[in-house]
Amino acid sequence: MTYGLVIDNDYLRQYPEYKDKTDSQITAADRSKVALKEMNVYQGEATQRCDQLISQHGDQNRNTATVGCRIYNASGDRITVNFTHSWVGHFFKESPDEYVENGQWSVFVVVADPVGAAIYRTTGQTDIFVGWRHYSHAAWADDISCYVESREKDHWWAVGSEGNLKDRLEKSGRSSTDNHYGYKVTGSIGGSNPNSFQVIIEKS
């Protein structure tokens, strides 16, 4: 489920600096900049939906870890899910949204001691790996981790293998960032809420 308004060229024209600009004069970097400024507007609704799904699953099974994922698209354009992969666990009720517009949050929950990933493709033909890992017995920082990468189109699994990425995910910490092929991606998991995983994708 997505939350937020689509931040496109028409949206930008409500601001004085973009009011008289044509489509060709407004760039993805411009749209990304505005999306980042307005990231918090719908963040509360996205977080609330995550908490609702986590609570619903908790009523059914309290013996395994659950992670609420919030993906914010500030890439400047639409991103689409190229594919998802689960080494352990599965999605609860809702799979990741097929596409997320610039300025929107995408929300989904993974359960059953999840270790998995979603790969998003940008309009710039960059593929972005977003990975999570959370075990129910997590008593140390290295039992909860996330890992992100920004790479060329079709990098996974032609270059980055399933085994290699799982190994990187397991060795990663509670935060991860990467900046390649025109996009910066930042992820963080845990913190004050061990069930929370947040990712920001922006134009670099």
Image (cartoon, rainbow, N blue to C red):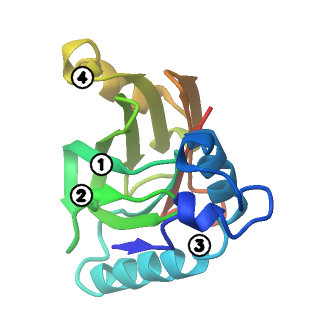
| The image quarter in which residue 126 lies | top left
Amino acid type for the residue under numbered disc 2:
Glu
Q: Earlier in the sequence, mark 2 or mark 1?
A: 1
Q: Mark 2 — residue? A: 98
Q: Can residue 72 be seen by looking at this rendering? A: yes
Residue 13 percent across, percent down from the top left: 66, 64
Quarter of the picture containing the N terminus is bottom left
Element type at mark 3: helix
Q: Earlier in the sequence, mark 3 or mark 2?
A: 3
Looking at this view, name the residue that lies furthest to the top: 159
Marks 4/3: CA–CA distance: 30 Å
Q: Earlier in the sequence, mark 4 or mark 1?
A: 1
Residue at the spot 51% in from the left edge and 30% down from the top edge: 172
Residues at circles 2 and 1 in contact by the CB criterion of under 8 Å: yes
Q: Dot 4, how many residues are within 10 Å of its Cα: few (below 14), some (14-19), or many (20+)?
A: some
Give the answer, above or below, for where 13 lies relative to 46. Answer: above
Residue at the spot 40% in from the left edge and 31% down from the top edge: 124
Residue 46 percent across, percent down from the top left: 49, 75
Marks 4/1: CA–CA distance: 13 Å
Amino acid type for the residue under numbered disc 3:
Gln
Element type at mark 1: strand
Marks 4/2: CA–CA distance: 17 Å
Q: Mark 1 — residue? A: 80
Amino acid type for the residue under numbered disc 4:
Asp
Amino acid type for the residue under numbered disc 1:
Thr
Residue 62 percent across, percent down from the top left: 31, 76
Element type at mark 4: loop
Q: Earlier in the sequence, mark 4 or mark 3?
A: 3
Q: Mark 4 — residue? A: 154
Q: Mark 3 — residue? A: 43
Q: Dot 1, how many residues are within 10 Å of its Cα: few (below 14), some (14-19), or many (20+)?
A: some
